[in-house]
Amino acid sequence: MPKASSDKLREIFKNDGYTYVVKSIDSERIDANYPNIPYWHISVGEECVRSDFPDATVICFEYRGSHYKLVSNWGIPDCNDGCFGALFDGNNDKILDLLSTGDVETTIRSQKNADTTLDDDFSTKLRPYLKFFTIVLENTTEFEYLAFKVLAENRRLYDIDEIDNPAVYNSDYDTPDDDEEEYGEGEVEEEDERGEEEIEEIEKKEFHR
């Protein structure tokens, strides 16, 4: 897989055909009605949330003639929250969830009827960047990708330029998920077994000295 870079991600965004226009970016305080607050931040038996929550970001944008509102919040830094919130259409109906689902992991889950699935080639190009930003597109759909793109381009995730930072970048983002894809089936296990046998032989020699 080609090495990931900020320029390549920007090129993907530029040529993907999913063009949107930002109308406004604002912030707002959140309350217990804010969508998808992680349950561990809601006081038991009370309709309130922690007072030290940062404000949510509200991005209003136009996409293919329709208007949308994306609200997002990164929660409490010390809690390693992922991003959470939702995407609403022009009728204020929720069509997509942003869910904090792990250690700074965000799952984007579409609820939109007839949401189009991204093609396999495009999904493959996205894979190293989704790993970098710790993003999961649950169904790999158009609006899940659109939400990711809006968040990334408007600095609601890590800075895109950090992809080029050797102190941050991990080469694992470029490698296939399965060992067999990179090394061939069985090769990794055989190498490990040979290593263990060599270690055992060395230990025996040391013991009998």
Image: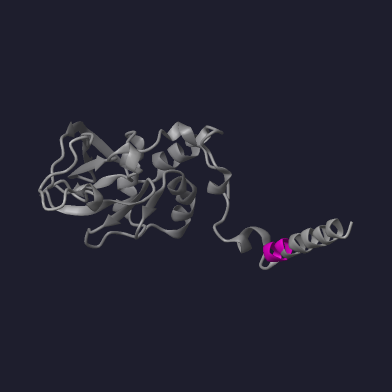
Residue 155 lies in quadrant: top left
| Relative side of 191 to 167, left or right | right
| Relative side of 114 to 13, left or right | left
Q: Residue at x 46, y 44 (%)?
A: 132
Q: Residue at x 61, y 60 (%)?
A: 179
Q: Residue at x 43, y 48 (%)?
A: 130
Q: Quadrant of the C terminus?
A: bottom right
Relative vertical location of residue 207 with respect to residue 147 in this rendering, above or below? below
Is residue 144 highlighted in magenta?
no
Residue 54: horizontal and vertical position, in percent? 23, 34
Residue 85: horizontal and vertical position, in percent? 23, 46
Nearest the viewer among 96 and 37 is: 37
Nearest the viewer among 38 and 137 is: 38
Residue 73 lies in quadrant: top left
Residue 88: horizontal and vertical position, in percent? 17, 48
Residue 142: horizontal and vertical position, in percent? 32, 53
| Relative side of 19 to 1, left or right | left
Per the rendered image, the range of residues in magenta is: 187-192
Relative vertical location of residue 197 with respect to residue 61 in this rendering, above or below? below
| Relative side of 157 to 111, left or right | right
Q: Residue at x 23, y 59 (%)?
A: 111
Extreme residue in the right direction: 209
User: How many numbered marks have been drawn onto this rendered protein structure?
Assistant: 0
Colouring scheme applied when the structure was drawn: one colour
Q: Main secondary structure of the magenta part?
A: helix
